[in-house]
Image: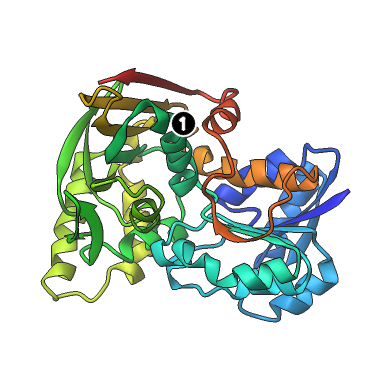
Amino acid sequence: MKRVLIIGGYGNFGSFISRSLAKQSNINLIVAGRSLDKAEALAQEINAEAAFIDIHSNLEERLQALRPNIVIHTSGPFQSQGYYVAEACINCGAHYIDLADGREFVSEIGLLDQKARKADRLVVSGASSVPCLTSALIDHYRDDFKTLESLDYGITTAQKTTRGVATTAAILSYTGKPFKTLINGEEKYIYGWQGLRSRKYPGLGWRLLGNCNIPDLELFPKMYKELKTVRFYAGLELPFIHVSLWALSWLVRIGLVRSLESSAPTLLKLSFLFDWFGSANSAFHMDLSGKDKNGEDKTIRFELTARSGDGPFIPCMPAILLAKKLANDEIKDRGATACVGIISKKEYLDALEEMDISWTEANA
């Protein structure tokens, strides 16, 4: 039996991971977080343990007492965190997995590589849709190209979906702020939630999208040297809410507001008022473009649609798959790495088959 501790195990993402891993016969699950009442309520429901953990207070002592073999960290936003949770796990002899989407946080996790190797532990950051699913798609389709030159991809979320303050704060932390991405072979500055564009998704219709800052923008130009352009977008289902956030982004860009991150609780509450206008359907697309083996232009389009509110579960899958593999001693790698090259496209999509999620792939 492997002891798997989930920090934030009763939250939006954490509860889904907890319910999934609690079904594994070789895992003793520990639901943990700052609310012991919430942890105990879920733990009783799924026959797991419950524990109080505040990542900012006596964390290493708590981990030493709980003796986990694997720790899954779901409590963001990660943009404002250091690596103290991962380091505490290494010091306590536990493997570490997080769902971080912070660009610098994920791309610089290699700073812990030597320490993790010395402790014979695996540290994985960004076990989420980006960069795990996105890199798995690139690795799968890359051999179809002579040169893979461009990535254009994005996520559009459902209005009627579970969403929390941490995820909202993560988005607002870079809204209206500049960050770099690769465009036509050069690193150029773009601004969060700007670059307004629209895209028609199969079965969902037109959705608005805006610039989003993710680990891929830092990782992929280094991993795939032939890339000349990497553009990632995210969008909200309701045009009114998307455009409202776009308008607020200008307040940050022109310097009237330093950051929107502190407004996350208020803006989140306001967004719930409009749920009855929306649906529970979200989508993801990735267009991979370059030259085929004959030197001709080629584009492969992968599109995924999630219905019935199942979209938020997609980012949870890498952590679930990694925890299962570690519990079964199927991963021998050690060190600290972003979640790339660990889970294949087939493994990822197979894990989604029981949900109301479908996907297509075709030459565009």
Residue toward you, 109 or 8: 109
What residue is shown at x 59% (from left), y 26% (from top)?
350
Check disc 1 and report its element: helix, strand or loop.
helix
The one nearer the camera, 349 or 295, is: 295
Three-letter amino acid code of the residue under disc 1? His
At horizontal 42% and vertical 41% (from top left) the residue drawn is 134
Extreme residue in the right direction:
1
Q: Which residue appears at 70% of the width and 47% of the height?
A: 323
Q: Kindly identify which residue carries mark 1.
A: 140
Residue 334, by quadrant, is bottom right
**Left or right of 343 on screen, residue 172:** left
User: Residue drawn at (84%, 51%), measured in percent from left and top?
Assistant: 2
Instruction: Name the spot of residue 133 as percent of width and height, x first.
Output: 47, 40
Position of residue 128 measured from the top left corner of the image (x, y, whole percent): 51, 47
Q: Which residue sits furthest front?
A: 294
Q: How is the image coloured?
A: rainbow
